[in-house]
């Protein structure tokens, strides 16, 4: 297989409904941050915008002015490099001013290339080293149980990320403890840094893997708000079991010329022309 | 020592409902009482150290105080990134109780020897590193851990070591304890090497050489102030540790003396394990003998150095 073939996702693409204005607005916020920093994992963020949006718009219980409110639901972005998507939603929800997005990666900014707990209101764990978020979420889900809170925990992982053995250690543990207050959302964009996940480290049959580890598992369209609302609104689907949602997404979603393109996994020294093209692609 | 430490966790759990215990795949029946009394705060998570550390971080973020116990090598090397990122970066109150620190597991070979554990734990920001000298000191240490704000690495030995710590000295993390007043020689030691230094000091005393012994139970933060007071007047300072000479107590004391005294500092000899994976089996005592860390060898190192100086 040639390099060119490797860099483009060969998997069948889910046909999602068109993005609405809110989804486009959140994407523009990511591009603005990328523009000011000149760098970022843009396409990794664009694949998970709808996952984060649905969680914060329709599913989770939280207080932007009291980010450590004990009874809140928790969302851990385990694939920390997708943080622009999380930051855009947190800013939109009022955890911090949207103007902070324009300080992204600046020396004194609270917003770095990976999200940091204790720095960014609403960020539940410092991630970026892959494979850490699920275990932390398992700790939080157990803490909720010990403390008799009905908080739920949502962990967003990448699909490349779940190459990490620690994810599968966590999968065994979540199942052993019957953590039905825990949901894993796999951002299944089918590309990792080097190329297609099917080539770098094939994950299939992925749903069967999660099921065999004791999860209730469903496939959903990760850009279809209705599909996501329905799936997330119904968790846990099986009492006593953690849930895994394999969210089929498109890396770079919403900006046609970077979709499915592994070379956009991380960009630095982005030019003015490239930025202009990104904005233009979001005009709909 | 381990029994005392584990019992300490149980006692803390009785007093404070934030305390949870997490083991990996410990010996059958370990912490049975804890499990019976506090089933919702007892976790035995299998051979999955990365997950255990992350899980402890999540528990601590939500107000719990996890005490984790497993074998030292697996609690340090295996899950180093989780310790660094999940515990130290977040600066969480998680306690790592490491069984078999040093060469306790000599018969099991190098995969089970924790000879660089303190160096790699010490290198992590926010981590406290402690190694008690004996079982009663381990007990005092456990009491002191409850309200420590950040992560603590606790290196335990095999147990049954001679008791040399004294109740009247009390115990405070980060505060070294003098067990014998310094003379021309001062031993600075940690863990189960402390009693070997006391024995070496006795041997030297019989030869008319006065040697003090400082029990630095806390490698990090190092009690620099007390060390600098104690070395004053000593001609020879000898650090003794059951640990590689790269990055442990000897390195830390050398740093302290060079930075704070510099020219004119007392002569420093660092005794420990050279930069090798031990190739022999046998017992902990056998390996300590191999690396010149038994009392008579420690005393010999001192007399030899003093003799060289005199010549």
Image (cartoon, coloured by chain):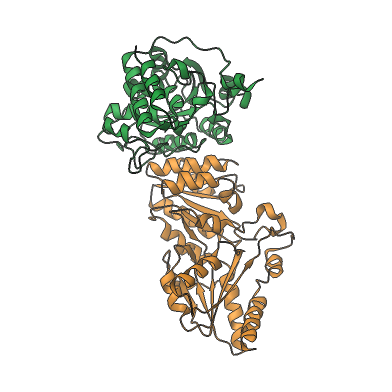
Chain colours: A green, B orange
Lateral position of residue A47 relative to residue B184, left or right: left
- Give the quarter of the image for residue A141: top left
Residue at 45 percent of width and 72 percent of height:
B167
Q: Quick check: B170 above or below B35? A: below
Taking the view exactly as shown, the residue that stands out farthest to the bottom is B208
- Give the quarter of the image for residue A202: top right
Front one among A40 and B267: A40
Can residue A249 be spotted in the picture?
no
Q: Quadrant of the N terminus of chain A?
A: top right
Q: Quick check: A261 above or below B38? A: above
Residue at 58 percent of width and 24 percent of height:
A197
Looking at the rendered structure, the number of numbered marks drawn on it comes to 0
Front one among B257 and A283: A283
Please provide percent x and percent y for residue A145: 41, 35
Please provide percent x and percent y for residue A48: 43, 23
Q: Quadrant of the C terminus of chain A?
A: top left
- Give the quarter of the image for residue A77: top left
Can residue B196 be spotted in the picture?
yes
Q: Quick check: A165 above or below B228? A: above
Front one among B89 and B162: B89
Front one among A80 and A221: A80
Please provide percent x and percent y for residue B255: 50, 67
Please provide percent x and percent y for residue B86: 46, 43
Lateral position of residue A121 relative to residue B172, left or right: left
């Amino acid at each position: 297989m040639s390099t060119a073939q490797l860099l483009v996702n060969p998997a069948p693409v889910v046909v999602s409904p068109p993005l609405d204005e809110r989804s486009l607005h959140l994407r523009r916020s990511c591009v603005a941050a990328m523009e000011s920093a000149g760098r970022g994992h843009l396409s990794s963020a664009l694949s998970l915008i709808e996952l984060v949006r649905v969680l914060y718009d329709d599913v989770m219980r939280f207080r932007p002015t009291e980010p450590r409110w004990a009874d809140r639901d928790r969302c851990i972005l385990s694939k920390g490099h997708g943080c622009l998507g999380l930051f855009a939603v947190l800013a939109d929800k009022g955890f911090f001013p949207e103007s902070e997005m324009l300080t992204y990666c600046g020396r004194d900014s609270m917003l770095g290339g990976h999200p940091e707990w204790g720095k960014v209101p609403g960020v539940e764990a410092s991630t970026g080293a892959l494979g850490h978020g699920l275990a932390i979420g398992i700790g939080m889900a157990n803490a909720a149980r010990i403390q008799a809170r009905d908080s739920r925990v949502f962990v967003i992982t990448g699909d490349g990320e779940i190459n990490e053995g620690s994810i599968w250690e966590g999968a065994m543990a979540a199942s052993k403890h019957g953590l039905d207050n825990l949901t894993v959302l796999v951002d299944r964009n089918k590309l990792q840094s080097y190329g297609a996940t099917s080539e770098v480290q094939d994950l299939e049959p992925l749903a069967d893997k999660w099921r065999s580890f004791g999860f209730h598992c469903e496939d959903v369209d990760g850009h279809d708000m209705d599909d996501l609302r329905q799936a997330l609104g119904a968790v846990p689907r099986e009492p006593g079991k953690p849930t895994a949602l394999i969210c089929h997404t498109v890396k770079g979603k919403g900006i046609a010329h970077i979709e499915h393109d592994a070379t956009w996994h991380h960009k630095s020294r982005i030019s003015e022309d490239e930025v202009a093209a990104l904005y233009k692609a979001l005009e709909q | 020592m381990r029994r005392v430490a584990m019992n300490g966790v149980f006692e803390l759990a009785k007093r404070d409902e934030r305390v949870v215990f997490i083991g990996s795949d410990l010996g059958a029946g370990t912490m049975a009482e804890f499990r019976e009394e506090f089933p919702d705060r007892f976790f035995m998570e299998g051979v999955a150290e990365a997950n255990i550390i992350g899980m402890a971080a999540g528990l601590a973020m939500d107000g719990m105080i996890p005490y984790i116990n497993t074998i030292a090598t697996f609690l340090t090397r295996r899950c180093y990134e989780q310790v660094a990122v999940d515990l130290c970066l977040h600066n969480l109150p998680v306690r790592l109780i490491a069984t078999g620190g040093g060469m306790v597991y000599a018969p099991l070979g190098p995969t089970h020897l924790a000879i660089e554990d303190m160096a790699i734990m010490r290198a992590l920001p926010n981590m406290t590193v402690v190694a008690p000298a004996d079982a009663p000191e381990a007990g005092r240490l456990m009491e002191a851990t409850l309200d420590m704000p950040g992560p603590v690495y606790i290196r335990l030995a095999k147990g049954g070591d001679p008791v040399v710590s004294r109740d009247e000295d009390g115990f405070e993390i980060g505060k070294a304890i003098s067990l014998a007043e310094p003379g021309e020689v001062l031993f600075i030691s940690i863990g189960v090497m402390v009693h070997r230094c006391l024995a070496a000091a006795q041997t030297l005393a019989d030869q008319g050489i006065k040697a003090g012994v400082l029990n630095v139970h806390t490698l990090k933060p190092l009690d620099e102030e007390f060390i600098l007071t104690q070395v004053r007047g000593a001609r020879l300072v000898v650090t003794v540790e059951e640990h590689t000479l790269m990055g442990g107590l000897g390195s830390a004391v050398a740093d302290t003396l060079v930075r704070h005294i510099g020219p004119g500092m007392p002569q420093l000899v660092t005794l420990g394990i050279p930069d090798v994976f031990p190739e022999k089996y046998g017992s902990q005592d056998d390996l300590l003998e191999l690396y010149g860390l038994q009392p008579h060898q420690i005393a010999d190192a001192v007399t030899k150095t003093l003799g060289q100086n005199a010549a």
